[in-house]
Image (cartoon, rainbow, N blue to C red):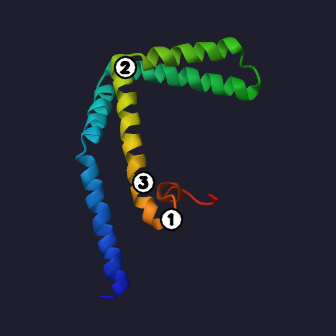
Amino acid sequence: MSAETTDRTKATELAEELGEAITELAVYEEFTEAKAAIENDAELQREMRAFEELREEFLMAREAGTASNDDLRELQAAQQELHGKPKMSAYLQAKSDVELRLQELDHIISEPLEVAFGETAGGCCQD
C-alpha cells in the first residue's frame, strides 16, 4: 500500500469518526428530535405546505411583476405565524444551534489547512 493510499485511508477514517462524533453531540440529537417532531405532526405539515404554496405564488407574482407590498406583508405574516408554532420554533432553534456547531468544527478543520474548508467543499469558483 502506498503512502498516499495510507494517508487517504487515515483521512477517510478520521472523517467517518468525526461524522459519528457529530451524531452523538447533544445539539445534533436535539436537532434530529425537533426535526422528527415537525415531520410527525400532520397539522404542522399541512400548514407548512400551505405556507410553501403561498410563497411560490408570491415568487411567481414577483417574477411577473404583479406582486404588491400587501402580498409581501401577507407572506411575512404567514411565515411569522408558522415560525411561532412551538414545534417549528424549537426546530428552527435546534437547526441554528447545530449549524453554529458545524461552523465551529469547520473553523477548527480549516485552520491548519489555511483554507475555509466548508466553503470550498461545497462548490467551485469561490475566491
According to the picture, the residue beneath numbered tag 3 turns out to be: 106
> Mark 2 falls on what kind of element?
helix
Identify whether 92 is placed above or below 80: below
> Mark 1 falls on what kind of element?
loop
Nearest to N terminus: mark 2 or mark 3: 2
Cα separation, mark 1 vs mark 2, equals 44 Å
Q: Quadrant of residue 85?
A: top left
According to the picture, the residue beneath numbered tag 1 turns out to be: 114
**Label ID, residue 14:** none
Three-letter code, disc 2: Leu
Image position, residue 125 (x, y; %):
63, 60
Closer to the camera: disc 1 or disc 3? 1
Cα separation, mark 1 vs mark 3, equals 12 Å
Residue at position x 70%, y 23% in the image:
61
Q: Nearer the viewer, residue 95 or 54?
A: 95
Residue at position x 37%, y 20% in the image:
44
Q: Quarter holding the N terminus?
A: bottom left
